[in-house]
Image (cartoon, rainbow, N blue to C red):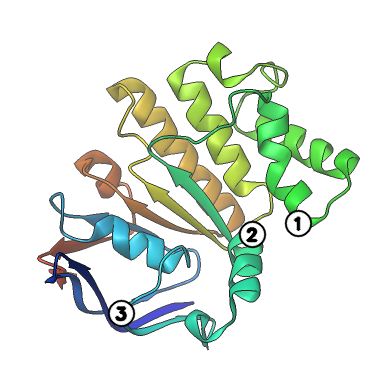
Amino acid sequence: MIEIHQLTKTFVKDENRIEVLRGIDCHIARGESVAILGASGTGKTTLLQILGALDHPTSGRVLFDGADIFEWDEPRRAEFRNKKIGFVFQFHHLLPEFTALENVAMPGLIQGMSKGDAYRRAEIVLTEVGLDDRLTHKPGELSGGEQQRVAIARAILMNPDIILADEPTGNLDVETGGKIQGLLLALGKAQNTTLIVVTHNRSLADGMSRTINLKDGEIHDL
């Protein structure tokens, strides 16, 4: 499903070149759950952002079902992000002035769904993550774990092929983090969604079908 070939990413700052990714090669199958582990600064988040077409590689290729996503123009990549990928971040990025229902419906509205259809779909996925009694609550009225579940509901609204999660349990206590971990894995299995998670959490990584270790911008012990 996802093929990564000789992927590099170099940043230039004050005339200094910083090589963050150095020739990454990897294949990830449809429905697979993959944890990306590594110390801070090893390129985990950069790799995730490139896989989600939020950033461009310096060189190399990222193929989705055989097509190189960086040969597309930006409107097509934007459509790819909206239809094919669900993002879950450590900081949930919910809009504070909107309710849980409104936040979750947002990707559908952006994609051109009618308000009624987007809200009906949002209610369904919020129910799936156990928040059917929090539809009209704004983020400030929700616990950290509830906010993260809203973010997960938003990520799965469009039935994405891939969920990309960056430290999804990083700001949560152990018990709540365990529940979020279980929820992500259960949703991935139920929908045959490919789940790729950047994490420092060894327990979360151990629940995945495979672990990728990044060190100095390279894959070790795949």
Q: On the image, numbered disc 3 is attached to which residue?
A: 58
Q: CA distance from mark 1 to mark 2?
A: 7 Å
18 is higher (above) or lower (below) than 196: below
How far apart in space, not on screen, are marks 3 and 1 (Cα)?
29 Å
Above or below residue 172? Residue 117 is below
Residue 118 position in % (x across, y down): 81, 43
| Residue at horizontal 46 percent and vertical 62 percent from the top | 54
Residue located at (44% from left, 73% from top): 29
Residue density around tag 1, few if under 14, some if 14–19, many if 20 or more, within 10 Å: few
- Residue 111's label in the rendered image is 1
The mark that comes first in sequence, 3 or 2, is: 3
Judging depth in this view, the residue of 159 and 166 nearest the camera is 166
Q: Nearer the viewer, mark 3 or mark 2?
A: 3
- Disc assigned to residue 82: 2
Q: Please state which amino acid type lies under the numbered disc 1.
A: Gln
Choose mark 3 or mark 1, whichever is in front.
3
Disc 1 is placed on an element classified as helix
Tag 2: amino acid:
Asn
Circle 2: element type: helix
- Mark 3 Cα-neighbour bin, 10 Å: few <14, some 14–19, many ≥20: some
Q: Quadrant of residue 44?
A: bottom left
SS of the residue at dot 3?
loop
Contact check, label 1 and label 2, Cβ < 8 Å: yes
- The residue closer to the viewer here, 51 or 222, is 51
Name the residue nearer the viewer: 109 or 185: 109
- Work out whether mark 1 precedes mark 2 in sequence or the reverse, and give the earlier one: 2
How far apart marks 3 and 2 lie (CA) works out to 23 Å
Q: Position of residue 150 (x, y in %)?
A: 58, 31
